[in-house]
Image: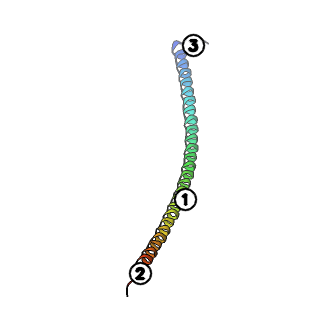
Amino acid sequence: MLLSGWEVTDGLERERRSILSSQVWIKVRFISDDTNRLKSMSQARMISAQEKAGAMVIALIVMLALTNGSIYFLSTRSIVRAQKALRESEERIKSRWPRKR
């Protein structure tokens, strides 16, 4: 059977289109796979960042509570010492200058 020029060209064109479509399909699959892989990586990174941020917030709250407690303790001690010094000063003044009646 002899093939005419048109039949050979038509068959080559179909083969070329088939190859091109399979190459496009393979590239689409690669891009889709890469996109899914990047999505899962970015989700894992976001979860990790959220966990780190949560830990940092808890650490900052603890530090704030300790700082607040220290300030309260030190200021309370200072006030108690100042009140004690004031009472002692008042007693010294009263002992040096007794009241006249």
First in sequence: mark 2 vs mark 1: 1
- Please identify the residue farthest to the left as the structure is shown: 101
Label of residue 4 in the image: none
- Of marks 2 and 1, the one in the foreground: 2
Do callouts 3 and 1 mark residues in contact (Cβ within 8 Å)?
A: no
CA–CA distance between discs 2 and 3? 138 Å
**How would you rate the neighbour count of disc 1 (Cα within 10 Å): few for under 14, some for 14-19, many for 20 or more?**
few
In the image shown, does 95 or 44 lie closer to the viewer? Answer: 95
**How would you rate the neighbour count of disc 2 (Cα within 10 Å): few for under 14, some for 14-19, many for 20 or more?**
few
- Please identify the residue farthest to the bottom as the structure is shown: 101
Residue type, label 3: Leu
| Residue to which mark 2 is pinned | 98
Residue type, label 2: Pro
Q: Is residue 5 above or below residue 64?
A: above
| Residue to which mark 1 is pinned | 66
Tell me where residue 57 appears, x and y as whole percent. 53, 54
Q: Is residue 64 above or below residue 1?
A: below
CA–CA distance between discs 3 and 1? 92 Å
Q: Secondary structure at mark 3?
A: loop
CA–CA distance between discs 2 and 1? 47 Å
Tell me where residue 82 appears, x and y as whole percent. 46, 68
| Residue to which mark 3 is pinned | 3
Q: Secondary structure at mark 2?
A: loop
- Please identify the residue farthest to the right as the structure is shown: 1
Q: Residue at x 58, y 29 (%)?
A: 26
Do callouts 2 and 3 mark residues in contact (Cβ within 8 Å)?
A: no
In the image shown, does 46 or 33 lie closer to the viewer? Answer: 46
Q: Residue at x 43, y 76 (%)?
A: 96
Q: Quadrant of residue 21?
A: top right
